[in-house]
Image: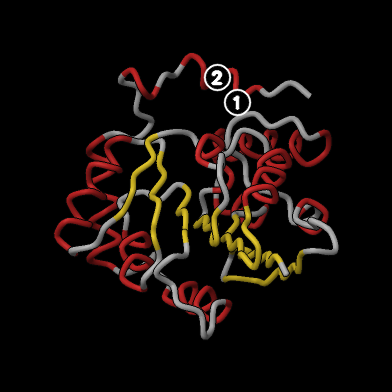
Amino acid sequence: MLNINLLISKFRNIQNGYDPISEQYAVKYFNDFEHEGKRFDYAIGEKILSHFHGVTLDNLTLIDLGAGPGQYSAHFARLGFKVFHQDVSLNFINLAKAYHKKQGVNVTYHHNYMEESLNRSYNVIFSNVSYYYCFSDRKFAELIRESLAEKGIFIAILHTERRLKMLKGLKGWILTMQFKLNEIIGLKVGHPPISSKVIPSMFNFGKEFELDILPWGIDTMVIVRKV
């Protein structure tokens, strides 16, 4: 299947000045996160901690995919994980660096596409509503399977078709068409939400893994544990 998003990325060189997130939007997103408290969910951290109950966290690696301005990365670093902060936007990463310095936490930064960061194993792979920015949903799931360390955990909050109901007009129609193309034939163009119909098979990694799929507000939480 043609990987259209991968082809598009070749013309949008993030290492040569292209940034999909404007500085103005990045600052607004950060301020909303900090002052309104709408997006931070401590329950996610608690689920990760419960997986490692009784285990020292100091040597455990965690990658935060599409980590944005870095509030979750800071939280995970304070918990004791060795944190890798990945984002395609340099504007977000610069905000994260300043925030992490203020918070007194050590974080390693990956300014690249999510696929490029899954080139090693991690004890925790975390994605907070950023999964749909990957080039191909199923191929990215395969990368996650390959990159999850022994006894590791993948946890993601996914946008699904329920998000389509929030959009109207031309934008809503275009995203719905993108969603249907991805759901029916696996052709992903842009960044549509993920069909809840394909989630169980997409994250069924085999007998070495346990899968939980949970409602999470309007979204869906997926937890995969390597046992």
> Does 138 sit above or below residue 75?
above
Residue linked to disc 2: 8
The percent coordinates of residue 44 (x first, y second) are 49, 72
Left or right: where does residue 203 sit relative to residue 191?
A: right
Q: Are marks 1 and 2 in contact (CB under 8 Å)?
A: yes
Q: Which residue is mark 1?
A: 5
Q: Secondary structure at mark 1?
A: helix
**Amino acid beneath label 2:** Ile
Task: Give the class, few, some or many, for how many residues have Cα within 10 Å of label 2's Cα (few <14, many ≥20).
Answer: few
Q: In the image shown, does 144 or 156 lie closer to the viewer?
A: 144
Helix, strand or loop under label 2:
helix
Q: Residue furthest bottom?
A: 54
Q: Residue at x 56, y 61 (%)?
A: 157
Residue 52 occupies which quadrant of the picture? Answer: bottom right
In 3D space, how far apart are the residues under numbered discs 1 and 2 (Cα atoms)? 5 Å
Residue 54 in sight from this viewpoint: yes
Residue drawn where x is 56% and y is 71% of the image? 217
Residue 100 is situated, as x and y percent measured from the top left of the image, at 22, 57
Q: Amino acid at mark 1?
A: Asn
Q: Quadrant of the C terminus?
A: bottom right
